[in-house]
Amino acid sequence: MTPRYALIVSLLLVAVTDLLRSEELPKLTTLSDASIKYAVPSKPYVVLRGGDVEAVIVDNQAADDEVLPGHRAGYSGVASLKHAKQKRNIFVPLYAGLNYEHIHDGTVQHRDILFEPRRASLKLRVVNDRIAELYQAPTPHWGLESCLRYELLDDGAIEMTLECIPHRKTFANGYIGLFWASYINQPESLDIHLKGYSAGSDNAQWLRGVTPKHGVLSTHVGTNDKRQFKHAEDFPLTLAFNRSRYRYAEPWYYGVSHGMALAFVFRDQDMARLTQSPSGGGQGNPAWDFQYFFSDYKVGQRYQAVMRALYVPFESREQMEKATKPHRDALRL
């Protein structure tokens, strides 16, 4: 893709994204559709099963039983992800994957404010045996109301839908920054794999995402993502704005752990930023992450993003392309 063509595509994507946000979005969670019925379980988690996959969705309370031994408070999302061919939880048992981690605007804030999704109460809502949601009322500092829907599809893929509404003019730099982390339990390789361009190259190829330490070369931005977000030079969330030397050509990546691959697939229009740390979950426990940014936000407007996570036995890059293709196609405009 030539630089001029990339710029044209980028402008079109921004225009389409703005149009989608200006029109009425589909109502996909209990945040926007009050007619959706749900139950509130007695425990802080629920077990979902689909295909060969078992996923345990947890709110940000602690849990310690046979399902979630030693799970710590503050870590929400998919606390455990297992497969018929790998009974070992891919995520660090103390923590979680697809974990709603940060709300920010690029300004220096107290840790409790930057980690507000951990601190503010999350309510678990069970819609059915395949769908659970995590609802968070407008948070104390940012005033961001949100709902995350985790749906286990027939083939075992997890579709995670975000809906959020800012209720106050609290984001000083005019954008909403949101961050999700997945803490991987002792994989043989800390790295991720993505298709894209290295510095100075015009040919898309498979790239091995390697970051030497936390917060260095950490974030891979899409070829069509020309957005710049103002932030403090000493902004403490070092993963968020420290870019790698790569730009991804396709909005997905995967990592490998104990014979299994975990792939994250995104929609083009959401312009996710792919982020990694070699030690986010402790020594030998990398964090395979992603970020969303909502530019020029408006108070009271509902924002939305959709992605999918696949957990499958790993054979090759070609096999991963084949396994993810139906999901990449489903998430295209």
Image (tube, grey):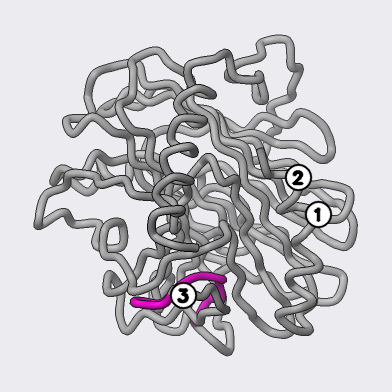
Image position, residue 264 (x, y; %) = 62, 59
Q: Mark 1: few, some, or many residues within 10 Å (few <14, many ≥20)?
A: few
Name which residue lies at 22% across and 49% down.
Answer: 111
Picture disc at residue 286: 3
Instruction: Look at the numbered disc 2 and give the secondary structure of its residue.
Output: helix
Q: Earlier in the sequence, mark 3 or mark 2?
A: 3
Instruction: Decide if residue 1 is on the left or right side of residue 170.
Output: right
Q: Residue 147, relative to residue 191: is it above or below?
A: above
Q: In this view of the protein, can residue 261 be seen by the observer?
A: yes
Instruction: Decide if residue 237 is on the left or right side of residue 151.
Output: left
Q: Does the CB distance between marks 2 and 1 fall below 8 Å?
A: yes
Chain part drawn in magenta: 191-201
User: Is residue 193 found inside the magenta-colored segment of the image?
Assistant: yes
Instruction: Look at the numbered disc 1 and give the secondary structure of its residue.
Output: helix
Name which residue lies at 72% across and 50% down.
Answer: 158
**Residue picked out by circle 1:** 326
Q: CA distance from mark 3 to mark 2?
A: 29 Å
Q: In this view of the protein, can residue 136 be seen by the observer?
A: no
Nearest-to-viewer mark from 3 and 2: 2
Instruction: Look at the numbered disc 3 and give the secondary structure of its residue.
Output: loop
Image position, residue 130 (x, y; %) = 81, 40
Q: Mark 2: few, some, or many residues within 10 Å (few <14, many ≥20)?
A: few
Q: Identity of the amino acid at label 3? A: Pro
Instruction: Decide if residue 28 is on the left or right side of residue 211.
Output: right
Q: CA distance from mark 3 to mark 1?
A: 27 Å
Front position in the image: 276 or 113? 276
Q: Residue 230, relative to residue 289: is it above or below?
A: above
Q: Would you identify the image quadrant in which residue 80 lies?
A: bottom right
Q: Mark 3: few, some, or many residues within 10 Å (few <14, many ≥20)?
A: many
**Residue picked out by circle 2:** 330
Image position, residue 115 (x, y; %) = 32, 46
Q: Identity of the amino acid at label 2? A: Ala
